[in-house]
Amino acid sequence: MTSLSAQLRADPTSFVEAPYDEAFNFSREELDEIHLHGLQKRFNELRPRLAVLDALAKEQGIEHINHVDDAVPLLFPHTVYKSYPLSLLERSRFDRLTHWLAGMTTTDLSGVDASGVQTIDDWIALIEKTTEIQLLHTSGTTGKLSFIPRTRRQWDDTVRITANSLRDWHGAGAGPDVLKNHMPLVIPAYRYGASSSHRGVDRMVRMYAGGDDNALFLYPGAYYSADVASLAGRLKAAEARGEQGKLQLSPALLARREEFAVREGDRPEQMRRFFESAVERYAGKDVILFAVWPILFEWAEAGLARGLRNVFGPNSVLITGGGSKGRVLPDNYRQQIFDFIGFSRYYEYYSMSEIMAGCPRCDEGNFHIPPTMVPYVLDPETGEPMPRSGTHTGRFGLMDLLPDSYWGGLITGDEVTLSGWDEPCACGRHGPYLHSTIGRFSEKQGGDDKINCAGAPEAHDKAIDYLLQQTQG
Amino acid sequence: MKKIWRVPLIIRGEVIDEGVVEFGGRRGGATFTTPEVGKHLEQLALDRPSRMADLYSLSFDDIAEYLGRLGERLNLDTNPHMQEAYELSRLTSGLSDSILRNHYENIPHFFRPEVARESAENFVGIDYLEGWVPQVSKVNPALTVKVRAFGARAVHVIAGNSPGVAAQTVLRNAITRSDAIIKTPSNDPLTAAAMARTMIEMAPDHPLTRHLSVAYWKGGDTKIEEILYHPKRIEKIIAWGGFASISHITRYLQPGIDLITLDPKHSATIIDSDAFADETTLRHVARRLALDVGAMNQEGCVCARVVYVVSGTDAKGLEKLNQLGKLTFEALQALPSHLSTPHKAFDPELKSELDGLRFAGDEYKMFGGRSNEGAVIVSQSDAPVDFSRLLSGRVCNLVPIDALDEAVLSVNSYTQTIGLFPESLKDRLRDRLAYQGAQRLVSLGGAATLFATAAPQDGIEPVRRMCKWIVDESASAELLEGLALAPDATAAAA
């Protein structure tokens, strides 16, 4: 047994210290041990302190985890982090929302007095100010935001693990060690926000770039509002059903229309300034670029139209993901992006808001699951786990072993094909991996009401337009 | 090997059964082939309106007699076409076999001469269908106006959640002497065709047989719809169904085409505090509520989903409401199997929402919802669940309120039926509910069990609107000539 596997077996969070590449060299026995011990540790430690887990375990009659598959009945449905009533947001009952959130985490929220809070943004800020939690919200599947109670330390770990992957994914030290040697950070998005693509940014600025002086944003002072994201999701869902007229808006949100209007009016100017600064400050220099594909394409298209090409240095890195779902991109969209940015070294991840460390993509196109995540392929009809051998297609379930203050077990809405239990990937890495054919069950069933992060900016604009159209009072 | 079903194209008495295009049925249950409708469009559209004339050689008695004979032949036990339609529906429908069989067994009743007569009388008026009806005017006695209801050339885009929709369409087409092209849905592509085939076997040359066509094409197929949905070929489109299917039809609208939509709807329930009078009353209410939720396995737009109850929202009120929830769930489980069973294809998206509710702390209480048995979700505050539009498969949501107003204001034009308890609530709320947009008020328990066949639907009168209302105005020759003359000339002429 390697020392790393022993270390991960004892404490999955020690992954943050690990040479990242070694985590994909474990034998099957080592991996099984890490998975089983990790599940037992999380279950035993969290159950007494997490009422929702305890209730589920009681109901399922589970006292011990003796096999990896024993944890399947304990995986939470993907609806869990949005199981609060939407009316709590519409009526600004953030005291009750806090009470709901308290059930999801071992972090003590008893000192949070949210009774006077009017907006989601203020609520998130209050939680951050008074507890260890820096909430993350999703971009709003079916019009409802999920809230995930991640702590400061967990955020630190997430951002560090990503840095480790940049350094070691293609071999120890083959990539830049941004934690040691800072690089300029360029993000064609908001500087602030609590959504899945904005929450880590604060740390990236600090830990990768060494501060705001070495970072560039499309909207430098702006905050990606959870209230607007929530409205965007609800609008889209209502539109899809032809029920737009039924939407209820909270007075607090209506009152903020002015603020949004000013920001909207300023957008073309900010885009111009962004391009100008990118060229002026970073032309030919190596940078870290962070954005999902569709946003990069939008940016590249605008940049190419301005006659900009090969903007950054050849040893820059792109951190990306998100596929092209929700938006039709031309076949050569990646080439257009590379032509614009001037480099083609990218790190792509399969990830989701609920998990701390994503699955990096190899040159074979597969997404490799880090040892701190226990993957399950579940029969879409029965929910039963498929064998941990061979190749199987079904609903993706997982237990993220990294979080120690909330339950990392989840049944996702994604359909995946998983291999790698018996044979290494053609790229040489060991352990389970997902094929690139990842789809959503909701789309398969005919409904496409998910706003994924790729579609979010457009939905966000629409929401602000809608809000501006509403007459006050 | 998986069975591939053949769905014929039927054009005015002719059966075309050369299955060449393959389609997958809904819920992944069945695959079927059809002829290529695009190749037969010329015949499918009745572009010579004069060919409607043969329908007018029939008296209403002839029509009623024909329908009566047809009804007898649509017996599921003896009619192989209906048996085949039933077998395919078992795979494509959301209804369990026992409920589906009950629906098929009821079809002959739709066609009884007395039902046809009453429907025609109440919907349109048989005298208007049979001839020119003088309109009395006290204002202008010199003018005689006569009105007659004529049939029209129409495409019916029908829903497939119950075979009754196909039967109703055939009936309505016959009594209005119309020419129907029924565009069938993929979740019931055979029932309308089975009826048309039975008509052909019974009376191949009868005008009613010769004015019914049945086709399946994928809704939204522009190659077909751009040609067919044209004022030269049809006058009306009667569309049942979802938001998407109706939105794509609206692109073909132009002067000369009348669109009659039976929109997607949801239904609700309002129960006043009288329900809590005593234990016996509460049980009684629970049973009737279970009927509104469970009948037709909640596959109909008429079925109850969100249930507003004036229980009060304080702890005592919630306790009472939770008791009603428990009793309703028990009553739901006890419903007879020809009305309701556990759902055979419970929506997985709804299931994950129900699973999520366990984590919502004390915001909701749920009875059932473990598997496909159905569920009663009791909100512990006065707001429905956020996924109320997904409620199906015998899942309802009881919402406590302090005053009836809250329930009334939640009603809008997407609300079809409202079940009410007690009966006196109707007198108190009926007008206000109508202003809000509700379209049908029923005694609790009657939402999906009482079907007055001859009543307006969705707040409109689709059968009246299927007709063309033609006017004949007469006045005396002198009066008309007089209008052509200047007043002084009139005086001179006199």
Image (spheres, rainbow, N blue to C red):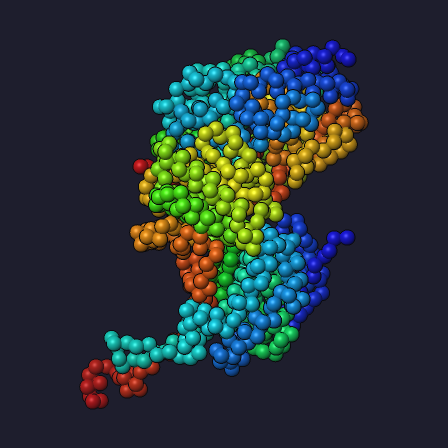
Closer to us: B356 or A323: B356
Q: Residue at x 19, y 86 (%)?
A: B491
Q: Tag count in the figure?
A: 0
* Residue A262 lies in quadrant: top left
Closer to us: B314 or B27: B314
Q: Residue at x 54, y 61 (%)?
A: B164
Closer to us: B331 or B184: B331
Q: Is residue B33 left or right of residue B356?
A: right
* Residue B23 lies in quadrant: bottom right
From the top left corner, tell me how far across and down residue A16 is, in percent. 64, 14
Task: Reply above or below: B345 against A271.
Answer: below
Which image quarter is the N terminus of chain A in? top right
Q: Residue at x 57, y 32 (%)?
A: A78
Which image quarter is the C terminus of chain A in? top left
From the top left corner, tell me how far across and down residue B422 is, in percent. 36, 50
Q: Is residue B54 left or right of residue B204?
A: left
Specify whether residue A402 is in view.
Answer: no
* Residue B170 lies in quadrant: bottom right
From the top left corner, tell me how far across and down residue A215 is, in percent. 54, 18
From the top left corner, tell me how far across and down residue B236 is, in percent. 49, 65
Specify whether residue B313 is in view.
Answer: yes
Task: Reply above or below: B444 against B78.
Answer: above
Q: Residue at x 50, y 17 (%)?
A: A107
